Amino acid sequence: MRLFEHKDLLSIDQLSIADIELILDMAESFKEISNRDIKKVPTLRGKTVVNLFYEPSTRTRSSFEIAAKRLSADTFNLSSSNSSTIKGETLIDTGMNLQAMNPDVIILRHSSTGAPHMMAKAVSSGVINAGDGINEHPTQALLDLFTIREKKGRIEGLKIVIIGDISHSRVAKSNIKGLKKLGADVTVSGPPTMVPIGIENYGINVIHNPSEAIRKKDVIMLLRIQFERQSNILFPGIREYAKYFGVTRKMIELANDDAIIMHPGPINRGVELASEVIDSPGSVILEQVKNGVAIRMAILYLLIGGSSK
Ligand code: CP
């Protein structure tokens, strides 16, 4: 019997609370492997994992590759610059050609919303959404949920604020869905031009002033301004953003004493977050990266290897 009844991982929407808890619990048991001298188990021996990245990535791509290798899967990487995309091949034709070589899973990052969903319909292998435009980044949200649960012991009832360019952030969208599913109290903050109109209707608090938004929160999650995804200038400039919305140590003092600081990366130091906060004891930013390997090991295992046995 399979533990996880999904061919693909495309969105937090498709996951039940039980699915999310299964992924987090599985990641907890996989995390220990990365601390061993020999960081490898034979669990996915003989499986093939393709990293197909049409946008730059430091964390997601390398952690998927490390996760696959720690489970003994074979991996290979393809990007837009070294694939036949530059000769005019469509995404789906690329997918069908990869499918002909029988991979078990294709991990896809793309600038267009819905690209992984199209790919999942076209190929019989599993597809994992590694970030599609401004839509979703489900594996980032799962590693964030894992980190919050690890640090706080729970997610239900926690007060969490997400600050930054909410409208263009796939990380914000996936996190809001996951956090709401698990019962957190979610607030978003940022310039009115970067917060979707009507988001309150989804049970989310909106406090534009970041100092007010941080007050008495348990978790403070920062986001980068997604300049590459904005079709209009939504703020006069980086210096103004840093002055009015950049989070400083003084602002963090308004949160609960044991609040944690999170950021999915990449960080623009001194813009959305001051360096002294990034490197402070409350910051769990690099632990998020570490947990990314465990979460991606769990997801690969559940999608292409998992059985009750
Ligand atoms: N958090 C995240 O998606 O980072 P990368 O763009 O480096 O993968």
Image: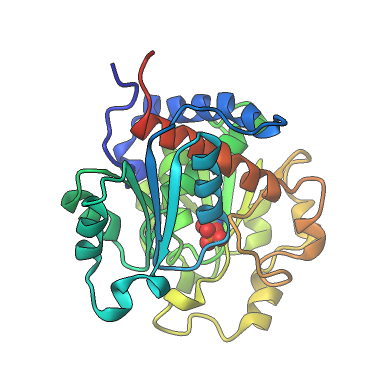
**Foreground pick, 263 / 204:** 263
Q: Which corner quadrant of the image does residue 263 belong to?
A: bottom right
Horizontal and vertical percent for residue 273? Answer: 70, 64
Whether residue 207 is visible, yes or no, is no
> Residue 25: horizontal and vertical position, in percent?
51, 24
Residue at image x 43%, y 67%?
A: 168
Percent position of residue 29, x then y: 57, 23
Horizontal side of residue 3 vs 250, given as left or right: left
Q: Position of residue 102 (x, y in %)?
A: 26, 45
Q: Nearer the viewer, residue 58 or 247?
A: 58
Q: Quadrant of residue 149?
A: top right
Looking at the rendering, in which quadrant would you find the C terminus?
A: top left
Foreground of the two, 253 or 233? 233
Q: Residue at x 39, y 30 (%)?
A: 302
- The quadrant where ligand 1 appears is bottom right
- The residue under the point 39% across, 34% down is 46
- Relative to 85, is 199 above or below? above
Farthest-out residue, left:
122
Q: Is residue 228 visible?
A: yes
Q: From the viewer's perspective, is residue 218 above or below residue 187?
A: above
Quadrant assignment for the N terminus: top left
Direction from residue 25 to residue 6 in the image, left or right: left
Instruction: Please tell me whether residue 273 is drawn above or below residue 24 in the rendered image.
Output: below
Image point (82%, 52%), residue name: 280
